[in-house]
Amino acid sequence: MKRCRSQSPEAPRKRQHVADPPRSEMMASWLSPTDSPSNPFGRSRSWQMMQDLPPPTPFSKHLTLRFQYVRRGSRTEQDNVMPTEGVYRIVQVPKNYTLVHLRSLVWWLFGGIFGISPPEPHDSALHIDPYAVEDDEESPYKFELKKAITMSRRPGQIKKGTTWAIASGLLDPYLYAPDQTEDEEAEAEGELADDRRWMAEEDVTLAHIWPNGLDVTRGFVYTHNPFLQVHITINTLSVPARQGKGRDPFVFIALGNAYLDPPFASPETGPPPLNYHFKFNSADIWNVSDAFRDFYIKNTVLPLSTYQVEDAVQRDVPEMTFLSSSPARSSSPMVSTPLSSRQTPDHHDPFSSSPSSLNATSTPAPRPAQRKRIMRMQRQIGALSQVVVYDDSDWEEAIEASKMGGETAGRVGCPDQMFSGIWSPQL
């Protein structure tokens, strides 16, 4: 009678000892804890929002606004014959435009395409007061969001109102990163040390300014420089209705022309000239498809600032390749590091493109700048560890031995020998 053998379970396989912790094919592919474009509080969101115009929306969700060009300062002979309407534009703008888009739109409407050349410095006939005095502490450009406004006798100009917020991206270190000294940075921070509410340009849309739709008691003022402003209010003139959807601004009326120079222009360039009586044959020249979008991308989408370029260089390049969505990872630029050059076939590559390796379970290599600091700290710690073994009596013996030249010098070591290891330790 044969003895029935019960099948015993297979012996567990020996676990392979690897440097990385065990992983499962079904583990969720968690990304590295870095900023993502969907993070509403992250810096990447601001950068992504500036790359293009917002998505198209129905024209019923657009606002028809009046952009009134206002020049402050002493009047010239040309200002005395200015018509009552002044220089203005009637434009239909999507409500999802941020103040970043509005700032570029103002530049485009007043001299962006059909602007005239700036005046010559020696042409005093077109000059008014200098752009700003030396002790002027006002920001070169900003948006003042107002409510309960009262209009001036001149159409389109805000006489007074309650400022509920001020927006400006001029001091944003992530977007512009100005090359300032510590004194200049402290002075710039002092300009914002008031009771007014300051907001980022990319965080404010037209829907925030007019939450209840066509409210003529609300508006905002764009201060281009201390002597140039553009008042933006709800249009009260009759304009035709439009059907469909889009994301481009639509100009209904354009009266007068002006050269809106950059807000940081030098005082030597003089004030911008005006042509109050300039009349466009048709507003259709403003409404060419993607005309404003091309201007926006060319003049508003900034290149990487110095801060961002340095930050990108300091980042560990394999980590950037790991987060990249491009399938061609091997073509990405790689910087050879001591850690990456010592990989063997038995060592798991945490930056490989296989699905099981998308989990950031291993600590990435430090950045080059961090690696230098770590190595410098290691050298200092190693040098200090050689010094602390000596107490006060050893110091006295070392000094005495260095003077006498006796045997104690060979046993304890002179101070020069001890300090020589601080700067070049053998690690």
Image (cartoon, rainbow, N blue to C red):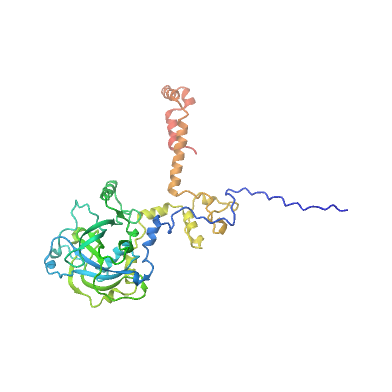
**Relative height, residue 265 to residue 59 (above, below):** above
Residue most extreme to the right: 1
Q: Relative to 21, is 87 on the left or the right? A: left
Camera sees residue 214: yes
Question: Between 216 and 333, which is closer to the camera in this rendering?
Answer: 216
Residue in view at x 42 percent, y 51 percent: 314
Q: Relative to 220, is 174 on the left or the right? A: right
How far across and how far down the image is residue 11, in percent? 71, 50
Figure quadrant of residue 256: bottom left
Question: Between 56 and 224, which is closer to the camera in this rendering?
Answer: 56
Figure quadrant of residue 144: bottom left
Residue in view at x 46 percent, y 22 percent: 406
How far across and how far down the image is residue 147, in percent? 26, 60
Camera sees residue 265: no
Figure quadrant of residue 148: bottom left
How far across and how far down the image is residue 110, in percent? 24, 68
Q: Relative to 32, is 87 on the left or the right? A: left
Residue in view at x 49 percent, y 62 percent: 326
How far across and how far down the image is residue 202, in percent? 34, 59
**Relative height, residue 172 to residue 217 (above, below):** above
